Image (cartoon, grey):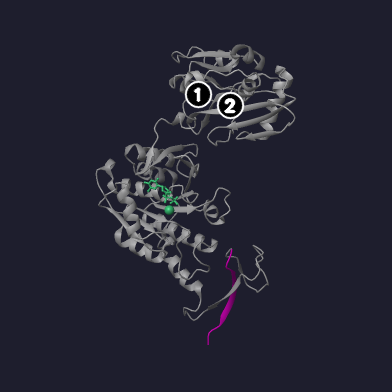
Amino acid sequence: KSKSKSTWVCTECGYTDGQWWGYCRECSNVNTMKEFTESDNGGKTSGFQVSERIVKSWLPKGSGDAFPMRLTDVNRGVNQSEWRFPLSGPFGNEVSRVLGGGLVPGSLVLIGGDPGVGKSTLMLQIAAIIADGKEIGKPAPVLYVSGEESVEQIGNRADRMEISTEELFLYSSTDVEDILQKAHLLSPRAIIIDSIQTVHLMGVTGSAGGIYQIKECTAALLRFAKKTNIPVFLIGHVTKSGDIAGPRALEHIVDAVLYMEGEQYSSHRLLRAFKNRFGSTDELGVFEMSPCGLKAVTNPSEIFLSEERSDSEFLAGLAIAVIMDGSRTFVIEIQALCAAGSSLSRQVNGVQAGRADMIISVLMKQAGLKLQSNAIFLNVVSGLTLTETAGDLAVAAAICSSFLEFPIPNNVAFIGEIGLGGELRMVPKMEKRVSTVAKLGYKKCVVPISAAEKSLRGLDFGDIEILGCNNLKEVINTVF
Ligand code: TYD
Ligand code: MG
């Protein structure tokens, strides 16, 4: 004589309801509510009891034993808890920086990115570095689990990348319970799950990749990481628009989220911390995809420039901007084309449309450029989007250059924000920007007069000539 209770669970979003409705009251999908029966006789009739059993097994044992701790007692152990696993080599250093200075024991890290961007490649290399443990002089097992590829396929890939680490263990499985059991036996230094969309937890509703599965699997892996102190990396496929809801829903569960980005036709890959409980989210790692894996780009300032132009072929309409991303400085090329004629269209690529409109209006009103009867096209070479006002001056310079048909020599860089009165304004980190272009061999740098007189004053940047200007008119008189 067993009582049983029914629950309806949405197979799309995992919403649980005690009552049947014709649709899901959470995500409004129709026909996605499935009935589950929970009985109190301990039998395995319901999926929930199975999942409860697994999930509970990764809960810290005897959570009732813990007691609130005095802050001063907690901090006595600070050196131990702040210890991070160092990643060696140029590639390792680059990853390490994005992680906030090394791998934190027991952390759960999500690596997101478009399919094909290189997440598996990145993690295989990281796995090898952790397994080698060069920095601490001791190899130890690292477990790379793939639900997408067979061990032979991963082996082939590792071979092509010239990875031959003794302690790297490959395993092909999609069952989280199985994975964690094997991990328990192997007791690895780190675990990589490739990818969270392909694994499932028995007894949890929905197929692998469904939001409910993704959340439960991540929760189980989180408990595993915290309990064993073994760091776990999750790979998640996210499309640019973020329309695969799964991995994005994990952002608040995991300790750190790193996104890997890359343009389709460029070999450069960026690794960006989007969330990090153990460090800043300003850091940016720059890599290059080669036939044998990812290589760190240690001096990346120029990666966004198009091919080098020789001095004889200056083009009108090009200007160099200096932008910051995290603690990194990049020089980028702004292109403008002003064409007098019947069509007055404006096409803007890589600059916020409102900002571009403002700069164009200021050029007309405050600098007297007769742009009224021109079609104007703007483009940021390399597919970047300018998010900083520091690029304003270069945008204006590119437009002037095209309008006046006067090529700007390619050893001139522009830094500064433009105000509504046509005045130039300071932007943060002027010294760093100027020193970057100076190191790259630029000969002139146009900056707001306030920067030239204050933050840059008395600093030695070598040969570069710093041209401080009050407003756009002065810039035009100085450069053109
Ligand atoms: P992959 O790591 O499989 O991407 P993801 O896991 O994010 O889906 O890498 C995909 C691309 O990287 C693939 O098109 C081939 C390229 N690649 C290289 O250029 N060099 C290499 O050494 C490797 C392993 C891959
Ligand atoms: Mg992959």
SS class of the residue under badge 2? helix
According to the image, label 2 marks what residue? 390
Left/right placement of residue 163 relative to residue 384 reads left
Q: Locate the C terminus by quadrant.
A: top right
Question: Which residue range is magenta in the image?
Answer: 1-12
- State the image coordinates of residue 402 (x, y, percent, origin top left): 63, 22
The answer to whether 136 is drawn above or below residue 434 in the figure is below
Residue at image position (47%, 14%) is 464
- State the image coordinates of residue 166 (x, y, percent, origin top left): 25, 52
Give the amino acid at mark 1. Answer: Arg
* Other residues around mark 1 within 10 Å, as few (<14) / some (14–19) / many (≥20): many
- Does 7 lie within the magenta span? yes
The answer to whether 211 is drawn above or below residue 363 in the figure is below
Q: Residue furthest bottom?
A: 1
SS class of the residue under badge 1? helix
Q: Earlier in the sequence, mark 2 or mark 1?
A: 2
According to the image, label 1 marks what residue? 433
Residue at image position (49%, 64%) is 208
- State the image coordinates of residue 95 (x, y, percent, origin top left): 40, 41
Q: Are marks 2 and 1 in contact (CB under 8 Å)?
A: yes
